[in-house]
Amino acid sequence: MLPDTGERYLSTPLFDDIAVDMSEEEQQLASSTPNYRFDVSPATPSAAQPEPIGEEVDAKIEALLAQILADRQQPLVMFALEWCEFCWSARKLFNALGVAYRSVDLDSVEYQQDDLGGRLRVALRRKSGMLSIPQIFVGGELVGGCNELFGAYADGRLATLLRAQGVELAEVPAIDPTTLAPAWLHPRS
């Protein structure tokens, strides 16, 4: 438990055996964490450097992004985050449709070295103009995020884009894509 103001907690029986003042051992422990000390003000952080949006992005990263988007063997590409519920929702739709897709999980171990995922995200933002994730492309054409994907599925545009790339869709009953959205978005009954 980390109370916001300890006084009210120290007055309960739960903390009767804890002294008000820190022991020498507790003080040593507290001073062992330089950026999180009680007895010293934190250092003023240096001004954060803005992401190089609009500036030169590493040519290798731009080339990698172009290569991923131009891969005819995997025309359906989703730039995603492993923990993102909207990415999970898009995956549910792709799986229900029986379509193969490439998921570039920018926060995965594979993309952590040299901040490859972060650098790809900057290049991706420059290409798409979008800040949000997921970003879904078919044949190099931006479909959009999860909401746009669901809209493209509902109006038939997704099927048209996929078929134009030679991707066959499984024969499945019509899906209400809103049922695939994160549960916290569903109205309560």
Image (cartoon, grey):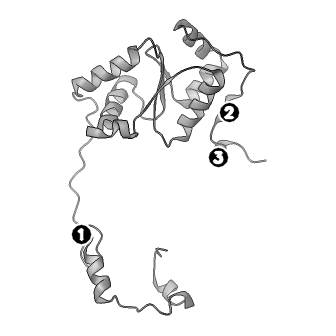
Residue type for callout 3? Trp
Q: Are marks 2 and 3 in contact (CB under 8 Å)?
A: no
* Secondary structure type for disc 2: helix
Q: Which residue is mark 2?
A: 178
Q: Which mark is residue 93?
A: none
Query: Which is more foreground, mark 2 or mark 1?
Result: 1
- Give above or below for 160 relative to 89: above
Query: Which is more foreground, mark 3 or mark 1?
Result: 1
Q: Which residue is mark 1?
A: 34
- Give above or below for 135 relative to 44: above
* Secondary structure type for disc 3: helix
Residue type for callout 2? Thr
Q: Are marks 2 and 1 in contact (CB under 8 Å)?
A: no
Q: Residues within 10 Å of mark 2 (few under 14, many from 20)?
A: some
- Of residue 97 and residue 9, the one placed in the foreground of this image is 97
Residue 89 in the figure: left or right of residue 53: right
Residue located at (24% from left, 24% from top):
60
Residue type for callout 1? Pro
Q: Residues within 10 Å of mark 3 (few under 14, many from 20)?
A: few
Q: Which residue is mark 3?
A: 184
* Secondary structure type for disc 1: loop
Instruction: Identify the mark nearer the N-term, 3 or 1.
Output: 1
CA distance for labels 3 and 1? 39 Å
CA distance for labels 2 and 3? 12 Å
**Location of residue 72 in the rendering, given as x and y in whole percent from the top left corner:** 44, 11
